[in-house]
Image (cartoon, rainbow, N blue to C red):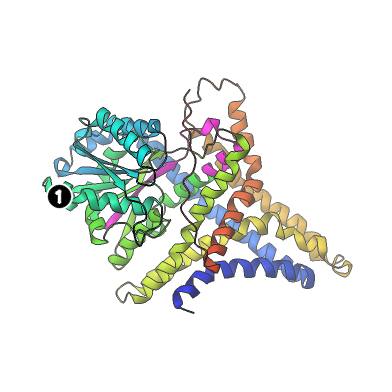
Amino acid sequence: MTLRRIYEIIPGFLVWLTLILCVVFSFVRPLWMIYFIILFDLYWLLRILYFLPFLLISWVRYRQALRRNWQQEAERLPGYDKIYHLVFLPFSKEDIGVVRETLEKLSRTTLPASRMIVVVGGEGRFPEHAERVISAIQSEFSQTFKALFFTVHPPNLSGEIIGKGSNLAWMARETVPKVLEMGFEPEQIIVSSLDIDTMVHPQYLSCLTCYYLTVSEPTKSSYQPVVLYNNNLWESPAMVRVAMFGTSFWLMTELARPEGMMTFSSHSMSLRMLMDVDYWQKDIVSEDSRIFLQGLVHYHGDYRVTAIPLPVSMDTVMTGRYWSALPALYKQLRRWAWGVENFPYMAEAFSRDRLMPWRMKVGWLFKQLEGMYTWATAPLLIFILGYLPFLVAPESFRSFTIFQNTPFTLQWLMRLAMIGLFVSAGLSLTLLPPRPTSLSRPYAYAIILLQWLLLPITFVLFGAIPAIDAQTRLMIGKPLGFHVSPKRKVSG
């Protein structure tokens, strides 16, 4: 067995070892299990109380950023006239209306469209659709931006898997030489990798320009905006909304402590870094976080994420029917959980790197492993397995004081942990898009609040289970392919 396989087995092995031991000890050592559950629930409470201030800090920064004139500030900075933006928009089977709306939003930002080079990349697996979209977009937007390029990613190339990463790699190799022929230096180009349904905030690119021109060593940083899944939030099922809000809040928490975060979904970086790491890897699913790790490894740890306090908005999964959206949500979250594939990559790359500080290596590996482990185990331990010893323990244990008092202790720990739920419910109201005119129900906002009662179910079904699924697949050597989430724009 190779070291690579051992690294792939470790995350799933730890998860299944925990779950199996919890069940076994509930029968044979119920008191041990009770002590463990008390300690775990206490740890989870402390974790919530630790992260809440970071969430609130990010929310305050977000609200303050909305009130600033970022374009005006950018134009005052030295070097502004040399900075241009290269925006990659890969698409697969998305409707042309989705592509058109994304480009329209880009063209109407405060940053002049003349400072943008846009690349629209279709998939050769769907040649007719790609040709139809590209033809329409070319006729509508050919004169809008500094330059507009189109690519079609050939299918079945050697060493590739189907996914966004392989398409991005093709787009970059096809268009970067053309960009350099226009006379630009790689350090002058900020690259944004956007999902095709990404609606950038009107000031996002202006804000990004400000940060790029003011942070130290801007080419050694990726740039992560606030990610909101609210383009069609009002029309989405309640469980989808809770899961997407949870993702947004998790990312906002990370933005207040970016020293340990990776890029996620739509984000930006310098062209210099992309060229240094030879663009995106073509055989992975988690290209958004992997491209950051490629920079971290290439620069021996001298690479970071800079938080951008303005949002980009994307679609939630949407199939048109309530119940069919839930399997689609599960597949989307399982794909995100497949980010566990980064652990063996990090372990291998760090073991070969003699220049990266060992404390940094340990820190990154622990954060990755601990995050994936708690993602898969915490919901089950808190809401299900934590109550198992009280159901199956022998009668002789039921007279013990700790056995009788622990349920009340756990209830109080969970009540205190509800602080996080109340804060999340309150903040969710401030992140809502305008309510569509077609949705005229006066109690719509009350539903948004009451939906948080579904958190325990959502936490288990769309948190722990897809995470266990992904880590088990990695453990047994059954790779997960790239799944394109179905999305549907709903106007109103």
Q: Residue furthest bottom?
A: 1
Amino acid, disc 1? Leu
Toward which corner of the image does residue 381 lie, by quadrant? bottom right
Q: Position of residue 301 (x, y in %)?
A: 32, 66
From the viewer's perspective, is 332 left or right of 449? left
- Badge 1: few (under 14), some or many (20 or more) residues near its Cα, within 10 Å? few
Indicate whether residue 332 is drawn in magenta.
Answer: no
Is 274 or 174 nearer to us in this picture?
174
In the displayed structure, would residue 365 be above or below residue 454? below
Disc 1: which residue = 180
Between 342 and 421, which is closer to the camera in this rendering? 342
Q: Is residue 154 above or below residue 63?
A: below
- The structure residue drawn at horizontal position 47% and vertical position 67%, both measured from the top left corner, is 366
78 over 301 or under it: above or below: above
- Vertical comparison of 429 with 13: above or below: above
Q: Which residues are magenta?
A: 220-245
